[in-house]
Amino acid sequence: MKLFYHCFGGAHTSITCAAIHLGYLPMDRVPDVREFISVPHYDKMEDKNRGTPVYIGRDELGIDIYAIGLKNACHIMIPAIKSYLNLNNIQSKEILFVESLVKLHPITGVGGFLSRKLNLVSVGRPLTIWGIRKRYSVFVEIVSGVKESLYQYIGIS
Amino acid sequence: MKVIYYGNNAIYSAYTMAAIHIGIYDEEKLPCLEDILRQWELCFIHGFQKGNLIYMGLDEDYREIYVIGCGRHGKMLEKIYNGLNAIFRIQEDIYFIKADIGEGWARFLISLNLRFPIIEAIVKKFFVSTYKRAYPKWCKKVRYEKEKLKKGKKP
């Protein structure tokens, strides 16, 4: 099974959720700036490569975790992905999508735009981290919910 | 190989170009008025439906032809499908063809008709006329892409 955390650019919130899921970032406290910077693929996705799924790792249940940027078109792209997989005899239950853009702090959006679109990494990256740290509990909540559902789905209590 | 015609919606230029590609519509002459009006109905009913990959048929070289409506996110769709090919080890190549010729007009006319159903007859006439004007351009683009496919060039 593959799990895709998706957001607008595939560089910040989806990567953060995937990192929390895989234990690269802690669930019990807000990580510091250096911990964010050391997360693989954080603030790295180029604007021109948006849409390319990025493999982050495999969790304890054997589920492959990916991050992907779908702009604001997830309502188009998710059916498009599912119909393509159906066409190739891959069942859609093999693939899960989790929206990680909920309750995004506006500063994260501004930072992401500066860093990824305008290439002002030194200004944008700290802003994204600041915004994500402010709403970190929301991301932890998302990932906890996902993990709980996965445990129930796979049948491990 | 899969050939995917993509546009803002699937049922106007992408559909017509795919139909020309597989020979449902003749390259040499315009489809009859009945066919054009049938496509108007199709646009009117499914004009805003996006994200479904629709199988159209096989071409003369046994390539599978599909159409999809993906808004303005065609390039992203290409990246996603190529990424999925790598993840799920799907060997078959995909050839993407952008099909957006004349789509703006069609979208405008459909929206206009939805807003003012009373002027349907006039809007339909406009639709037929824009369709007739766009048809040679679609044929030209399909011929060009077919040539490229025959030569084995990448899109």
Image (spheres, helix red, strand yellow):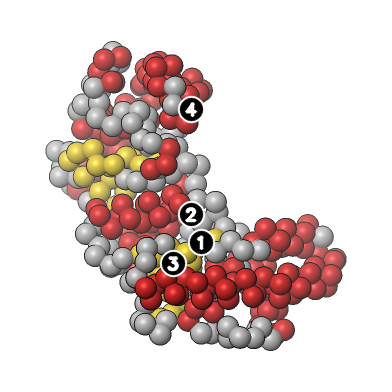
Q: State the residue position of label 3.
A: B4
**Disc 3 marks which amino acid?**
Ile
Instruction: Answer few, some or many: residues within 10 Å of disc 1's Cα (few below 14, many 20 plus, some between 14 and 19).
Output: some
- Identify the residue at horizontal 50%, vertical 72% (top origin): B144
Query: Which chain is indicated by disc 4?
Result: A
- Identify the residue at horizontal 42%, vertical 42% (top origin): A48
Instruction: Answer few, some or many: residues within 10 Å of disc 4's Cα (few below 14, many 20 plus, some between 14 and 19).
Output: few
Q: State the residue position of label 2.
A: B74
Q: Which mark is residue B98?
A: 1
Query: Which chain is indicated by disc 3?
Result: B
Sooner in the amino-acid sequence: mark 3 or mark 2: 3
Q: Are marks 4 and 1 in contact (CB under 8 Å)?
A: no
Is residue A29 or residue A85 the one in the foreground? A85
The residues bearing labels 3 and 2 have C-alpha atoms spaced at a distance of 11 Å
The residues bearing labels 1 and 2 have C-alpha atoms spaced at a distance of 7 Å
Pointer 3 and pointer 2 on the same chain = yes
- Identify the residue at horizontal 33%, vertical 62% (top origin): A85
**Disc 4 marks which amino acid?**
Leu
Q: Nearer the viewer, mark 3 or mark 4?
A: 4
Asked where in the image residue A24 lies, by quadrant, the reply is: top left
Q: Quadrant of the N terminus of chain B?
A: bottom left
Q: Is residue B82 above or below residue A147?
A: below
Q: Judge from the rendering whether residue A101 lies leftward or rightward of residue B49; answer left or right.
A: left
